[in-house]
Every structure is written in C-alpha cells, then in structure tokens.
Amino acid sequence: MPRNKLKLVSFVRGLRNLLGVGPHLLLLGLFLEGLTIVIQQWVSFPIRLNLEIQILLTIPCVVACLLGIIWFNRSLNLVEVNLRNGKNELITRGLFTYVRHPLYSTIMITIPPLVIIWFADLLFFIPWVLVILISHYVVSLEERGLIDAFGEDYEEYRKYVPALLPYKGAGGKRYREILGRRRLAARQ
C-alpha cells in the first residue's frame, strides 16, 4: 500500500478511535427525543411559553450550541495535529484544559434545552437525563482505555480536570504546571 494511503488509513483509524461512541451517543439522544415526541401524544407536562419567551430563551441556547461546535472543532484540531505527527501523547491543552471529553460535554449542554423550549414540555427532560447517565457510563468505559494508554499521567490529569462539566476552571493548566515541576525536579 502506498505510504500516503497508509497515513490516511492511520489518521482515519485514529480519528474514529478519538470520536469513539460520541456520534452514536448523539444519534441515541436524537432517537430518544424522537421517541419522546411520539410519547408526548399520551403523556405530557406542558409549560406555557409564548413565542417571545421561546425566542428569548433560544438565543442563549443557540449561542451555547455555536460555542459548543467551535469548542468541539478546536478539540478535533488539537487531536488532528497530534495524530498527523504520529504522536501518542495525552492532550491537556486547549479545551482539554477544562473537560476531558469535550464532545460529550457539547452534546449534553447544548441540544436538550432547545428541544425543551420549542416543544414546551417538561417531558423532554427524560431523554436529557438518560443521555447524561449514558454519557457518564460511556466516559467510565473509555477512561479505562485511556488509563491503559497513558497510565499515571492520565490518573493525575483526572484529578484536576472534570470529565464532562467544566466546573473546576482551568484544571488542565494546573495539571501541566505540576507535571512541569515534577519533570524539572526529576532532571535535577
């Protein structure tokens, strides 16, 4: 096989490994939302929202969606550079400074509020809760592989950076500072 084709195959495999079940999780979320639309015929918990309020609530959700897309795209760019260079290093900069799994964060934070607003029914909290639970399960499965691949470095990174919700601030920056100090001490 030509060298360029091997590089492309390797890159595609690396990208597929990176995305893992993320696209499947998104499809599952959409399926659950669709199922909820069907169930809504029999069970409903409507909330009263007029068009002005729906539009007003939609603006921050759309902004969050766009920021989520940008966030995820920047994460992919970091990983793409890593894969193209043939490296197998733990990425802790960029958006990985704030969460360990930016794809799942984007899915969880952006899509469900829009559905709840436009269908004006609290029934749509159910798929959101299911996606959050499934995301935590998927993250725990994926992290086993990450621990196998990166060992103590990943364990330490986990202490500073949350998996899905960026509530610890720039934990990855603190992780890199501590790692840098340890490497400097090891050299001396």
Image (cartoon, rainbow, N blue to C red):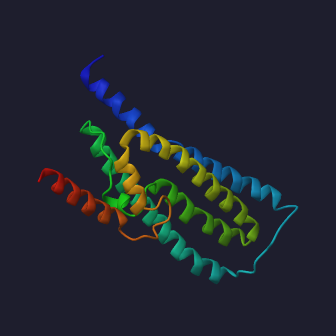
- Is residue 124 placed above or below 32 in the rendered structure? below
Q: Quadrant of the C terminus?
A: bottom left
x 68%, y 50%: residue: 31
Instruction: Give residue 128's quadrant in the image.
Output: bottom right
x 48%, y 58%: residue: 163
Q: In the visual, does 184 lie left or right of 30?
A: left
Q: Position of residue 54 (x, y in %)?
A: 64, 78
Q: In the visual, does 164 lie left or right of 50?
A: left
Residue 6 shows in this picture = yes
- Is residue 20 placed above or below 29 in the rendered structure? above
Residue 73 shows in this picture = no
Q: Position of residue 69 (x, y in %)?
A: 44, 59
Residue sitting farthest toward the top: 1
Q: In the visual, does 126 lie left or right of 81?
A: right
Q: Position of residue 2 (x, y in %)?
A: 27, 19
Q: Nearer the viewer, residue 140 or 125?
A: 140
Q: Nearer the viewer, residue 151 or 51?
A: 151
Q: Position of residue 36 (x, y in %)?
A: 76, 58
Q: Nearer the viewer, residue 105 or 37?
A: 105
x 45%, y 67%: residue: 166
Residue sitting farthest toward the right: 42
- Numbered-mark total: 0
Q: Quadrant of the N terminus?
A: top left
